[in-house]
Amino acid sequence: MFTWIDSRPPRTVHLVLLCLGACLLARLAIFTWLFAVNVPFSDQWPLLSLLFDGFQWADIPRSFVWQHGPPRLGVAFALTTPIYHLTGWNIRVDAGMIACTLVAAGILALRLRRVLIPRAWNLWDAVLLLAFWPLNVFETIVITPLNAHSIFPLFIVMLVANVWLLEPSWRRTALLVLLTLCAGFTGFGLTVLPALGLLVLLRAWREPEHWRRTLPLFLGVAGTVSLFAVGYRFNPAVEGFVPWQPNPLNYVRFGVAMLNYFFSFFHPAIPRSAYPLGLLFGALVAWVSVRSIGALVQRSATRSIDDTRFMEVCVLLCGTTLGFVALTAYGRAHLGAQAAHAPRYMALILPAFLAVHLWLHRESTNAARPLAVALLCLLCLRLIPETYVAVDRSLYYSNLKLCWLQSYQQDGDWAQANARVLEADREKLFTPLWMGSAEAWGYMAGHRLGPFNPRARVTALDVFYTNPCERLQ
């Protein structure tokens, strides 16, 4: 079986990968076009409040340091703010940008694979296409588009890993310092900082004579942390948060549930109490991390530069995901393990997945190949259920937004629109807080923004039907 995968002619492999990539990209593009609705929703309202007094260029630095929940929104929000202004608060444009960011992160992941493992493309690389161009991040793309939460941070982490592989120079150091600042201030990209700090310390330990090379990056990490702390107030953004769980195993259970959900191809309604895939994946991530750190601690003169760079990137990728899982578990463990099954968490699981894939791809042991086949099979088995769940949930929230907008446009009554949607909502999930405030909608209507912009399309679903409220019942 393994020989068949590796021995395919190059043209056949390239054709298979190109067809798979084209299908995945088409799926993502059609999905985004169809289910992105030009209606502000949920977490977008606090961000749009920055523009209620009109756009000013001073809003860009304010966007960079803007805190939303635990993280700041950084460069992603700083880029989104003028785009919102130029497009009349077009949420569909924002969703398209997020989808493009995800595609770019996948391209950078493919580049990492080619640089770190300079072999010809083969069918094992389908794993990266299936993993990095998924629909399991649909919540961040079309339900509540928010590039700064995890998808743009994923893109920054992929950039950091690629820049790390460049030859030492002042340009490389400057780029890494700049990317460190961007990562620390952009959503949960801050979880890359501990891994970067560890890599700097490991390199300083192995090469004490080259301390001048590592000092600027160390100062960059320390400076980013210091700047981040200025005026920062921890906000868990969830009710019932407690600083410390009485049972510390709740954090472990939550983290394992997050990792398990990444691979799960079951319907969400099916109970998952053992989380076997999460345990296996977590063990693989820990194994790659320990092996890499153990090798980097040694001052070996026989280890090649390529081996060192490979292990450093693995530490960077695994450390980012482990930091994200730990931070999320700390803030959400009190909600129970079921709360870990959230699509918005999936993007920053990808760095560790990439590290595990690279390690298995590089190894040729009897244990590595079956594990690599298992990863490929799991991702293939996830394709149809993943698409079904993404379409089902996105269709529900799209109809909810459109039903609310249709009700509001009838008489301009914010409270009455909420009441109508509450009555029509068969799943009883709707909460009026998702739709901002009456004052915010009055501002949008008066300035012809968002769904009131005559030059922007509200939805693509009107091609298929015109009464979304009936779809909610």
Image (cartoon, rainbow, N blue to C red):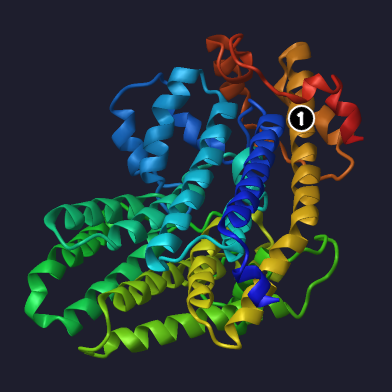
Q: Is residue 161 above or below residue 369?
A: above
Name the residue type under label 1: Asn
Q: What residue is rendered at 74% in x and 14% in y?
A: 409
Residue toward you, 12 or 127: 12
Residue toward you, 279 or 15: 15
Q: What residue is rendered at 63% in x and 23% in y?
A: 438
Residue toward you, 56 or 354: 354
Tell me if residue 449 can be seen. Answer: yes
Residue 278, image x and y in percent? 66, 75
Tell me if residue 253 can be seen. Answer: no
Q: Quadrant of residue 230?
A: bottom left
Q: What residue is rendered at 27% in x and 80% in y?
A: 304
Left or right of 347? Residue 80 is left
Q: What residue is rendered at 12% in x and 56% in y?
A: 170
Residue toward you, 11 or 328: 11
Q: Quadrant of residue 370?
A: bottom right
Residue 271, image x and y in percent? 83, 70
Left or right of 112? Residue 432 is right
| Residue that numbered label 1 is attached to | 418
Under tag 1, what secondary structure? helix
In the rendered image, which quarter contains the C terminus? top right
Residue 302, image x and y in percent? 24, 89
Q: Is residue 32 above or below residue 232?
A: above
Q: Residues within 10 Å of mark 1 (few under 14, many from 20)?
A: many
Left or right of 159? Residue 375 is right
